Image (spheres, grey):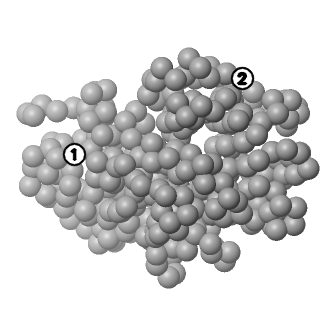
């Protein structure tokens, strides 16, 4: 079967494309440029690379149709209008499955925990989450109306070696990592009990692949893609102090005071959108219907990312 992966060299595609190739799928990787995956794999030698810019090429959909995919894995769809175009173009075709990458951001503020992957009454906080949720609803309606073969995957905070992960402040600033590495005191917002969800890119890719191999169970369904556990800001900070061999030096500040302490309005806003959606996920559905078995815990994923920071000189170690 021919699988087209849109956004193939990013956090998920880096791992998904080799999985597909090694399992015998004719794999086409669509990217805007000849960007390389975060981790190299010999399987990429057997991948057809096609350069198309979804935002700039007005004939993107026509080019996609010309490839004649059996399966589309759409990892970089951020706009409901793009979802409508996909459905309109392929609803009467031989497409076997369209896998849409949504986000945990579509859940919005938490009410009853854990989050329900089938919730149709979400309250996203920002345009990104609102567009993702709108696409989820549209695809579920298309499945009911036309039998459009949609599957929705909702990853947590995708993490791993080679890219910026969410830190104990709920943003991607390197400052807090360096402070902890030096054994200095840090302040967390509120009481540090907000929850974040580091999930390794490999495990997210695994959910997509399992949804393909369990197609009948996956059609018309939504699945969370997370690690088995999550972590609080406090737990994350404490773990890092231990990682770097220091006793924890953690204080707490009310939100307005913490934003002043953090010092960067853009980073403070980034933190807000991560911790205002604090909650937990239940993987029972993903495990039961897709036979999903996470390979990495959230702590293992964090440690791999931090080691990558150190190896790349982004965290400076002077006494370890």
Q: Is residue 45 above or below residue 316?
A: above
Q: Position of residue 70 (x, y in %)?
A: 76, 40
Q: Residue at x 25, y 67 (%)?
A: 252
Q: Is residue 23 above or below residue 208?
A: above
Q: Position of residue 121 (x, y in %)?
A: 66, 77
The residue singled out by tag 1 in the image is 179
Mark earlier in primary sequence (1, 2): 2
Q: Is residue 65 above or below residue 113?
A: above
Q: Position of residue 272 (x, y in %)?
A: 47, 62
* Quadrant of the frame with the N terminus: top right
Q: Residue furthest top?
A: 45
Q: CA distance from mark 1 to mark 2?
A: 41 Å
Q: Residue at x 63, y 33 (%)?
A: 25
* Quadrant of the frame with the C terminus: top left
Mark 1 residue element: helix
The residue singled out by tag 2 in the image is 51
**Would residue 11 be found to the left or right of residue 145 on screen?**
left
């Amino acid at each position: 079967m021919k699988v087209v992966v849109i956004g193939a060299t990013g956090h998920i595609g880096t791992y998904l494309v080799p999985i597909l190739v090694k399992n015998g799928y004719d794999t086409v990787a669509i990217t805007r440029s000849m960007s390389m995956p975060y981790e190299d794999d010999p399987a990429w030698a057997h991948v057809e690379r096609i350069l198309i810019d979804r935002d700039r090429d007005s004939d993107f959909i026509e080019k996609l149709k010309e490839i004649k995919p059996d399966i589309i894995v759409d990892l970089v769809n951020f706009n409901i209008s793009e979802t409508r175009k996909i459905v309109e173009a392929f609803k009467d075709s031989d497409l076997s499955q369209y896998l849409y990458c949504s986000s945990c951001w579509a859940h919005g503020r938490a009410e009853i925990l854990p989050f329900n992957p089938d919730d149709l009454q979400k309250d996203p906080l920002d345009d990104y989450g609102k567009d993702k949720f709108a696409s989820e609803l549209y695809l579920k309606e298309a499945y009911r109306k036309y039998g459009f073969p949609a599957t929705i995957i909702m990853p947590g905070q995708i993490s791993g070696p080679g890219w910026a992960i969410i830190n104990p402040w709920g943003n991607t600033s390197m400052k807090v990592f360096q402070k902890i590495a030096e054994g200095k005191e840090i302040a967390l917002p509120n009481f540090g009990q907000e929850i974040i969800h580091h999930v390794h890119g490999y495990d997210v890719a695994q959910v997509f692949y399992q949804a393909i191999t369990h197609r009948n169970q996956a059609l018309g369904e939504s699945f969370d893609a997370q690690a088995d556990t999550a972590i609080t800001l406090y737990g994350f900070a404490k773990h890092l102090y231990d990682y770097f061999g220091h006793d924890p030096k953690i204080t707490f500040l009310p939100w307005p005071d913490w934003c002043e302490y953090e010092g960067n309005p853009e980073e403070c806003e980034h933190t807000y959108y991560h911790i205002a959606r604090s909650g937990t996920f239940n993987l029972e559905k993903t495990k039961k219907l897709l036979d999903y078995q996470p390979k990495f815990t959230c702590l293992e994923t964090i440690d791999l990312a931090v080691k990558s920071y150190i190896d790349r000189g982004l965290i400076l170690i002077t006494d370890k």
